[in-house]
Amino acid sequence: MKINLATLHQSSKGHTMSDQTSDAARVAPSEVDHAEIHYFNSYNHHGIHEEMLKDEVRTKSYQNAIYQNKHLFKDKVVLDVGCGTAILSMFAVKAGAKHVIGVDMSTIIEKAREIVKVNGMADQITLLQGKMEEVKLPFPKVDIILSEWMGYFLLYESMLDTVLYARDQYLEPNGLIFPDRATIFLAGIEDGEYKDEKIGFWDNVYGFDYSPLKHTALTEPLVDTVDLKACVTEPAKVFEINLYTVTAADLAFKEPFTLDCRRNDFIHALIAWFDIEFTACHKPIKFSTGPHTKYTHWKQTVFYLREVLTVEENEQVQGVLSSKPNATKKRDLDIEIVYRLDSDNPIRTAEGRCEYKMC
């Protein structure tokens, strides 16, 4: 299913506006701006948590990373940042943690408390409602930080800034972070049929020329499950994060990429996905959100190019991917892709610059 990010209502997990507005008054607008209110309210409804819990790649990867490394969790104090329904907190208790503190701003934490209680863990898990930057933890330091902070394109509406705050404020000097590595990849795809359906639609809308809306359509990335067969190029690693050392400033990045073409074909769009690693584990655990592996709720992010590239096997598309938080809405992203195809056939040589807004 193609998902236009413009139809999503401040939710990095794909929740829709209609599912959220009933809870819109739950978070008081004291010192939280309007966008932040919508972001936190998007996690009030149980449906969004159901989607994440049913994502077996996501949830089982965390479960395996914790259960297979009980020697790391035994008698440790654990902080679960953005705990949601407390599934990671309960995994940690099962692995032998001495105590777990879960922090979440949304009202789902009320249900999380009930869930923890009915599972007999109320004495081992403390759940706090509020912003990580404002709550007072019952322990001055923690041994391990758990968090599922990733959004679409890894960084869209993600909680990584909050995880980094928790790391700097509460993590013991030799403490662990689960997960601790993330990598963004790019590839080129052939997707002419859908591009014509999405972009070409504006050329003739019931007999009228709506082409001024083409610009808007081209600057809105899609979240979609892409067939591996559509990939025209090899994947390229573009941006890597080490959660032990990365800073919030590092998340505004500008990185070069080179895409090696697999075959003679067309490139209508570039897609992005990310891989996640738990390298602290005795046997490292990782998962991918790419088109080559099992479905995850993150799918892939599709960036349509203004012009179609005609490529041949062994040619390269070179470029630069830039991403930074929006100046006024920090959970939104401003993304730029600059690219160039050099060919022996000058007619096919092409270059371009595209700007996108994930909002």
Image (spheres, grey):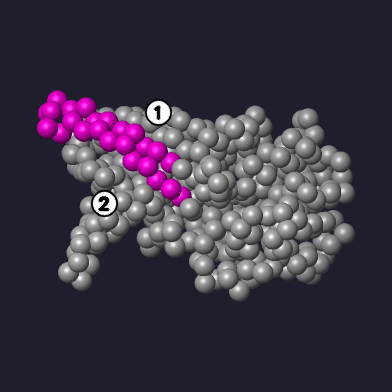
Residue 191: image tag: 2
Q: Secondary structure at mark 2?
A: loop
Q: Amino acid at mark 2?
A: Asp
Position in image of residue 289 (x %, y %)? 47, 48
Between residues 102 and 37, which one lies in front from this camera angle? 37
Between residues 5 and 112, which one lies in front from this camera angle? 5
* Residue linked to disc 1: 256
Relative to 59, is 127 on the left or the right?
A: right
Quadrant location of residue 112?
Answer: bottom right
Q: Which of label 2 and label 1 is nearer to you?
A: 1
Residue 342 within the magenta-colored segment of the rendering: yes
Asked whether residue 104 is in view, the answer is no
Position in image of residue 168 (x %, y %)? 74, 35
Residue 40 within the magenta-colored segment of the rendering: no
Task: Tell me which secondary structure the magenta stretch mostly adopts.
Answer: strand
Residue at image position (77%, 58%) is 129
Between residues 83 and 30, which one lies in front from this camera angle? 30
Q: What residue span does the magenta drawing correspond to?
A: 335-358
Residue at image position (49%, 45%) is 333
State whether residue 117 is above or below residue 136.
below
Residue at image position (34%, 34%) is 338
Asked whether residue 38 is in view, the answer is yes
State whether residue 33 is above or below residue 68.
below
Q: Identify the mark nearer the N-term, 2 or 1.
A: 2
Label 1 Cα crowd, 10 Å radius (few <14 / some 14-19 / many 20+): some
Q: How many marks?
A: 2
Relative to 64, is 230 on the left or the right?
A: left
Q: Residue furthest top?
A: 344
Q: Secondary structure at mark 1?
A: strand
Q: CA distance from mark 2 to mark 1?
A: 24 Å
State whether residue 180 is above or below residue 120.
above
* Image quadrant where one finds the N terminus: bottom left
